[in-house]
Image (cartoon, coloured by chain):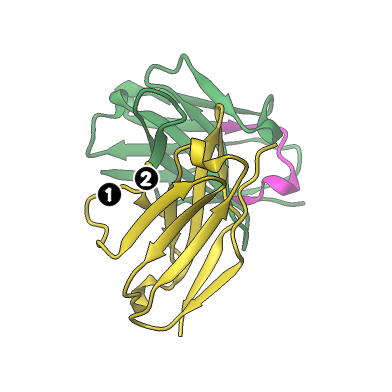
Amino acid sequence: VQLEESGGGLVQPGGSLRLSCAASGFSFSYYWMAWVRQAPGKGLEWVANIDQDGSEKYYVDSVQGRFTISRDNAKNSLYLQMNSLRAEDTAVYYCARHIVTTLLLDSWFDPWGQGTLVTVSS
Amino acid sequence: SYELTQPPSVSVSPGQTASITCSGDELGDKYTCWFQQKPGQSPLLVIYQDSKRPSGIPERFSGSNSGNTATLTISGTQAMDEADYFCQAWDSTTAIFGTGTKVTVL
């Protein structure tokens, strides 16, 4: 199982960026997927997750309306479109396979990609 | 909003037992998992569903969850276990991570 993020970089406040996550080694279309971020020197913060066919999506309040999670099962890829970026969005963004049993309450993230750094600064 | 609180740091001598707590309101009614993160690396799942170990995780890692506290226990701690550890649970459809604990093996 491998997850490889790309698309990070330096962007000005108010700008946009699209992150990608290429998955391999497992049946991508069978799994929920998620984005989790980590600000420099800080803890982990869940950002968003998406179900197998993209019909169910959830976001942390701080990105609701600005970020959009999506997936392309034909390309085994996960995406995060980030608009109206703020300085507080600066973080390493990790892609993770989200293993869900029957309910989200009984689920976990495994494995994680190596992450891609997003820096929002003028 | 729901919060999970961990001690900032735990120190342990090699071969001894390290216990890392994660506190949250009625946490015992939720499933908790634990992640290990070494410097410059991505998080690694070490415990899920309170007490289960993924394939490849050493038996010295164990977990429990009751009341308001989940605990990750590392028995016979090794130098390679020095890392940050984060607990995680769900509050409805929101994933909540703990504040993180730095484990130092002295």
What's drawn in magenta, residue-wise? A81-91
Query: Residue A52's quadrant in the figure?
Result: top left
Whole-percent x, y for residue A43 in the image: 59, 55
Quadrant of the rendered structure where residue B74 is?
bottom left
Chain identifier, green in the render: A
Mark on residue B48?
2
Secondary structure under the numbered disc 2 in the rendered image: loop
Give the chain letter at badge 1.
B
| Of A107 and A14, the residue lying toward us | A107
| Amino acid tagged 2 | Tyr
Q: Residue B65: in sight, yes or no?
A: yes
Residue visible at 45% across and 85% down? Answer: B106
Label whose residue precedes the other's in the sequence (1 or 2)? 2
Task: Verify CB contact (< 8 Å) between mark 1 and mark 2.
Answer: yes
Determine whether, in the image, residue A30 is placed left or right of residue A112: left
Q: Which chain is yellow?
A: B
